[in-house]
Image: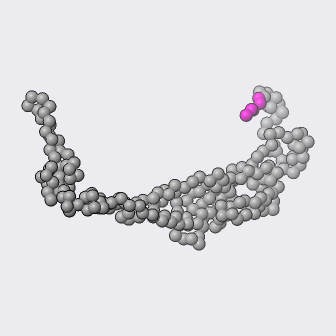
Amino acid sequence: MKCAGCQGAGYKVQIRQLGPGMIQQMQQPCNECRGSGETISDKDRCGQCKGEKVVHEKKVLEVVVEKGMQHGQKITFPGEADEAPDTVTGDIIFVLQQKEHPKFKRKGDDLFYEHTLTLTEALCGFQYVLAHLDGRQLLIKSNPGEVVKPDSFKAINDEGMPMYQRPFMKGKLYIHFTVDFPDSLSLDQCKALETVLPPKPASQYTDMELDECEETMAYD
């Protein structure tokens, strides 16, 4: 039946006088019919919704996160938002937030891992066990005679993240190496290293020219 408060218009008009010869007219939704223009008589009113046309209920949605989904990716449940009369029901959208890992960093389908080598390991070879995200133990080792430089990377194929909707394919695992240098060396250690390392470059200056230079010390 037509709302008596707004005569079926769905809104009410309020007029307020601001001053001599000045009025303000405001239009706002009717509070009796909530803007619908209709009301339901007591005898026709639903006992469950009390004439509100909607009821509150709980619904459990199962959110399935597939392998390889990315940070910020959305999972949509069409038409599962709250319903209301004379409106199109919206969607429920879950946005994935990826939790940071203390050792592994993800970039797309690739993983990055930081590892520090001693100077001896960088020059003479290394091997260590890497505990992967899925619990497997990977043996990482250098090739014989290989020298690992500071800030270098090595890639391992198919050990990165699984690719979304391509479950049998994976990205790469990149290992970023840093080298921990000793703070100082003794004279004997320096002489021993000079016997196995490439020789120092020859000086481009004569002793006389060097004597004319001002000697300085570099500090951290």
Q: Residue furthest front?
A: 43
Query: Is 46 part of what is drawn in magenta?
Result: no
Q: Quadrant of residue 208?
A: top right
- Judge from the rendering whether residue 19 lies leftward or rightward of residue 54; answer left or right: left
Q: In the image, which residues are magenta?
A: 216-220
Residue at 74% x, 32% y is: 219
Residue 84 seen in the current view: yes
- Judge from the rendering whether residue 90 lies leftward or rightward of residue 46; answer left or right: right
Give 188 or 112, whichever is nearer the viewer.
112
Rendered view: 65 above or below 150: below
Quadrant where the C terminus is found in the figure: top right
Q: Residue furthest left?
A: 21
Residue 40 seen in the current view: no
Residue at 57% x, 54% y is: 99
Quadrant where the N terminus is found in the figure: bottom left
Query: Is 218 part of what is drawn in magenta?
Result: yes
Q: Residue furthest bottom?
A: 168
Where residue 90 appears, as percent x and y from the top left, is 34, 60
Give 188 or 99, whichever is nearer the viewer.
99
Residue at 66% x, 53% y is: 103
Residue at 45% x, 63% y is: 60
Q: Quadrant of residue 143?
A: bottom right
Where residue 202 appears, as percent x and y from the top left, is 81, 43
